[in-house]
Image (cartoon, helix red, strand yellow):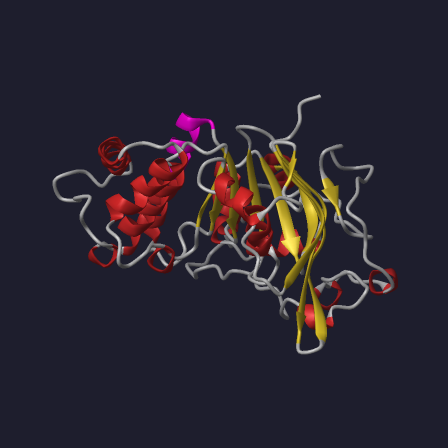
Amino acid sequence: MTTPLLEIRDLGVHLQAGGRQAEILSGITLTLNRGERLGIVGESGSGKSITALAVMGLLPHRMALSGTLRFDGQDLTTISEAAHCTMRGRQMAMIFQEPMTALNPIKTIGAQISEGRRLHLRENRADADKTARRLLDRVGLAAPRFDLELYPHQLSGGQRQRVMIAMALACEPELLIADEPTTALDVTVQAQILDLLDELIDESGTALLLITHDLGVVSEMTDRIAVMYAGRVVETGDTQDVFRHMAHPYARGLFAASPHSLTMRPKPENTDKRQRLTTIAGVVPDPFSRLPQCGFADRCRFVQADCRATVPPLGNTDFLDVAHRVACFHPLTDEVMV
C-alpha cells in the first residue's frame, strides 16, 4: 500500500488565552497522495488556515497541537524547529493569502526567489539568480520590465502573487499549500493566477493543498474536497462526487451562496430580474464557547434533538460512495444538479 505524502489523523489544535481554552481544530483526518490535489473549503473561522499552519509548523506559540501529522512518513509533531526549517521551502511550501505582508519589503524580488535555492540546494548566487529569472519569466513577469532588482512595493497585487508562486515553486517542493491565493485580487487577475497555478502544478507533479471559500475554484482544480466547519471536517470525498451529491446541509449552503450555483439554477420564467445568492443565517460559533453538539446545529434548518445531544462522527452512509463521508445525523439524500 502506498504511503500518503501527507497524513493527518485526529488532529487537534487548542488555544489557551485569558484562563480559557478554545478548541480551534478537532478530529481533523485527511490524507494527500503524491501529485494529488485536495481542496479545503469553508467560511472564515472554519479552521482552514490553521490546518495549513499546523502542517507547515507555523502555529502561534500559544496553540497546542495533538494527534498525528506525518509528511512522507515523518512525524511532524516530534521534529525540532531546525528540522522543520529544513523541510519548509524544500519539501513543502506555502503561498500565503496576502503577498504584500508575506514578501519582505526590504529585499528585492530576485533575492527572495533565489534565497531558497541558495539555502536548500546550495546553489551559488549566479545560478540561483538565473533560476529566479527563469521562474519570473515562467509566471509572466518577463524581463526587461520585471527586473530581479525590483521591490515588492513596485508591483501590483497580482504581480506580487506571481512572485509568491515563483518563490513557493523555486525548490520544486513535493507539497504546495495555497491559502486563498487570489484574495484581494480582481476577478480577471484571479482567473489568470489560478490558470497559472493549475498549469505549473501540472508541469511539476507537485501535490496541492488548496484552501479557499470558492467552491467553483475547487470544482475545477482539485481531485478531492474536504468541507470544514467550526474546526471539523463535515464532508469529504472525490470532488465531483461531492458536488453531485452534497449530503451535509452546510455544504449545500456553501454551494447555494456561491456565484457558481447561479449558472446551475433554472432561470425564472418571464423575468429579467437578477437572481440573488442564498445566504446562511447566523455565524460560525466562537471557538471559546463551542458546545458538545453538531457545530452547525444553530444554523441548520434540518436540526433535530440528536443534533444537539452529541457531535456527529465523520462516516459513510448507505447512499453515498464509499470514499464520500459526511458528519451529519440527517444527511440530505437528493442529488444536487451541478
Left or right: residue 2 versus residue 305 is left
Is 198 magenta? The answer is yes
Which residue is situated farthest in the bottom direction here? Answer: 18
Residue 311 percent coordinates (x, y)? 81, 58
Q: Quadrant of residue 302?
A: bottom right
Which quarter shows the N terminus?
top right
Residue 264 visible in this rendered orientation of the protein: no
Taking depth in this image into account, of 124 and 140 the one nearest to the observer is: 124
Q: Identify the residue shown where x is 48% and y is 31%.
A: 206
Residue 143 percent coordinates (x, y)? 15, 38
Q: Which residues are magenta?
A: 196-205
Left or right: residue 306 versus residue 335 is right
Residue 307 percent coordinates (x, y)? 83, 61
Left or right: residue 198 versus residue 306 is left
Judge whether 17 appears above or below 191 on screen.
Answer: below
Which quarter shows the C terminus?
top right
Residue 14 percent coordinates (x, y)? 69, 62
Left or right: residue 192 versus residue 218 is left
Which residue is situated farthest in the left direction here? Answer: 144
Q: Quadrant of residue 293?
A: bottom right
Q: Could you tell me what secondary structure mostly forms the magenta stretch?
A: helix
Taking depth in this image into account, of 319 and 326 the one nearest to the observer is: 326
Number of numbered discs present? 0
Residue 61 visible in this rendered orientation of the protein: yes
Q: Identify the residue shown where x is 36% and y is 32%.
A: 122
Is 112 magenta? The answer is no
Taking depth in this image into account, of 65 and 204 the one nearest to the observer is: 65
